[in-house]
Image (cartoon, rainbow, N blue to C red):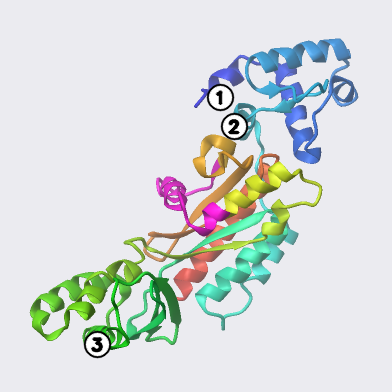
Amino acid sequence: MTDTGHLLNEMNERSREVFRRVVEGYFETGAPVGSRTLTREMSEKVSAATIRNVMQDLEYLGLLGSPHISAGRLPTETGLRLFVDGLMEVGDPSAEDRGAIDSGASSNDDSVATLLDRIGSALSGVTQGASLVLAPKHEAPIRHIEFVSLAADRALVVLVFGDGHVENRVFAPPPGQTSSSFREAANFLNSIIAGRTLSEMGDVIRTEIARHRQELNARARELVEGGAAFWENEGTSYERLIVRGRSHLLPGSEEEEELERVRSLFDDLERKRDIAEFLELTETGEGVRIFIGSENKLFSLSGSSLVVSPYMNADRKIVGAIGVIGPTRLNYGRIVPIVDYTAQLVGRLITDRGQ
């Protein structure tokens, strides 16, 4: 990645003002900003020719670009990164924005999943972007497990937790399963799960299978032995990804090529490709992270940016993440404090509910 601090040091006050006004104009309109526009906005009186020279210098530094044959300039990804790291002013979220987010968390009766769903919808509405909420795994003890066949290659595992929470997870069972082997596997698991959480299941299953290996028929044993991934969620501490506000990324005026890029982005999200990768980056510490365009391979084809923050439980352990996806012209100075506020709110709610 380019050393944006070094680039900032190469810019004088006039260059910085021109650059800042181009970026802010881009955030506001999404359109290139021309020299004539800037002559009316600059704090000192300068000619359009002087501003054009400054813009050319900024283009040489890789901070601005010229789209098509337009006389105006747009910030590059490097320019946006420099602005975010060195020039952006971040305040507190407005009372109106805080109120809208708080309204999503107004009920104490909802399950955590429902609560996070509502907060995700509120976050999308406030930011006019698509929101991502990675929910924590449900850690209540399991009360009952049941398998349901859906097709030859698809089945459902139903997990009923001690607190009444129910989860349905689709998985690909080993070949040759029958209703009898499903029933036998469920009976075996129900006999050993009492009072145990999902994260405790793996070791218990391995121990009990070794102890009762001869009592299970081959198909049921194969189902139980191969099943750790679907109730441990492949070893992650996350339960599901909630995406709200897709329509904000699909405005009617966009070109078909851009629509396909955004659809591709959501296809990736639904398959959870690379989700773990950018969440690992949030785990290096507290605070909001900003990924602009191709800085994260999940978004390299969509011209999108991600603003994301982890949230923590009472033990200060990261248990999930909150984020907003939008075009690279997101108003980062406004979005960052909103995401930070939402992540802290969710952390408090998770803690209060003992998650």
Q: Please say if 55 is above or below 289.
A: above
Compared across the picture, whether 2 is left or right of 44 comes to left
Depth order, front residue of 104/70: 70
> Start and end of the magenta stretch?
267-290
Q: CA distance from mark 1 to mark 2?
A: 7 Å
* Mark 1 lies on residue: 4
* Amino acid of disc 2: Arg
Where is 45 relative to 172, above or below? above
Closer to us: 2 or 258? 258
* Left or right position of 84 against 138: right
- What residue sits right under mark 2 in the picture? 81
Q: Is residue 314 above or below residue 35?
A: below
Q: Secondary structure at mark 1?
A: helix
Q: Which mark is residue 184?
A: 3
Give the x, y percent position of residue 160.
39, 85
Residue 129 on the magenta segment: no
Horizontal side of 222 relative to 352 (left or right) equals left
Disc 1 versus disc 3: distance between alpha carbons? 61 Å
